[in-house]
Amino acid sequence: MKNLTSLGLALLVAALFMGCGHQGGIDPSTINEAYGGLTTEDEEPLFGEPQVFDAFAAAEADLPFPDTIASDPVFITEEQNAPKIHYLILAWGKLKRDSVDGTVDALTPQDFSGTLSVTTGGMAVVRKVRMEQAQGDGVLPRTDPKLIEWQSTIYGGVDGMLVKIAAPQDATVTLTAAGQTVAKLVSELDLTYGIVDVPDTDDALAWAAAGVAKEGGCPHGYMVGRWNKRIAIGGVFRGRWVSADGELRGHMRGLFGSRADADQVFFGKWIGGGGEFHGLLAGRYADGALQGHWLDRELQLKGRVKGIYFEPRILEPRKVGFYLGTWQEACPADPIQPSETEVQ
């Protein structure tokens, strides 16, 4: 990505670049109130902050990626035979940047061209961040269901993609880019996440994954957006709530911070396209990881969330971080325990 101010992004990772310097109606100082002062009432669409969520507009209009492998008979057979389909979100680039103006790193491009492979089974690209075709970025032509290759040069932003994996639980998925390699068993790609730094740079590779059972499984998906530390004790976050296959389910907004008892908590609200209330989030965060749950309008548990976040190294309105995580709805196959309700 050449410049963050000129991005027209696709899919989820668009949320990483939204202008969260605007605090809007969220006040981090209310962190000591029940659920951070958030309510279960409906909101205006986009929380009445269209200028803040404008960066999502291009992403939500994008069509799924036309991967030819998705209609290949070999991949279709693998997909039909797999009891569980795994969805893997990848993001790479300036995930820990200190500025959003795209000028600091303009002269230090990083080649993130890479590969994703699986030992058995197959993969299909579902969606991707819009890589600049003018500079040769993009997913390379696919001929092997077990291999995805791409070209991506990062200047001051982030690229990424969402991949569907149909493979046995003991198959190994390997990601290679920017001199870094990550290998995971398919059985490990279920409500998991991680990040790898590129040495001597501000660059990194991040991922989140969810396994979706074809029968009897609980619905899964992703949440991704900006994590903006506004005051010493905490800050605000804004982002998107999407299904496992990348379909937009709504937007979210919330706050995080240290309470009077030093407990580090976050609270958020998930709404639909018309502003209708869908969920109230509550949880804890520390050392780059967050975990919690969400409640319905009657404050009954509906599901769990977990993921990773990065705070900017310097506290200043234009210096923002990001979060990337997974959500899982409660269902008989994986009921939520009462102990998960302790944050409020």
Image (tube, rainbow, N blue to C red):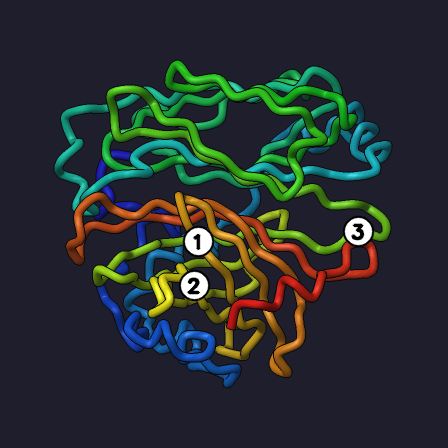
Q: Is residue 141 visible?
A: no
SS at mark 2 in the image: strand
Q: Quadrant of residue 64?
A: top right
- Residue 2 numbered mark, or none: none
Q: As rendered, which of 123 and 25 lies closer to the eye?
A: 25
The location of residue 223, given as percent across then percent down, is: 51, 54
The location of residue 99, given as percent across then percent down, is: 18, 44
Residue carrying label 2? 266
Residue visible at 24% across and 20% down? Answer: 200
- Pointers 1 and 3 in contact (CB under 8 A)? no
- Residue 285 numbered mark, or none: 1
Q: CA distance from mark 3 to mark 2?
A: 27 Å
How many C-alpha atoms fall within 10 Å of the one at disc 1: few (<14), some, or many (≥20)? many
Going from N to C along the chain, the mark reached first, 2 or 1, is 2
Going from N to C along the chain, the mark reached first, 1 or 3, is 3
Q: CA distance from mark 2 to mark 1?
A: 7 Å
Residue visible at 62% across and 58% down? Answer: 304
Q: Is residue 201 visible?
A: yes
Hey, what amino acid is under mark 1? Tyr
* 184 left or right of 179 in image: right
Residue visible at 40% across and 59% down? Answer: 264
Going from N to C along the chain, the mark reached first, 3 or 2, is 3
Hey, what amino acid is under mark 2? Phe
Residue carrying label 3? 217
- Pointers 2 and 1 in contact (CB under 8 A)? yes
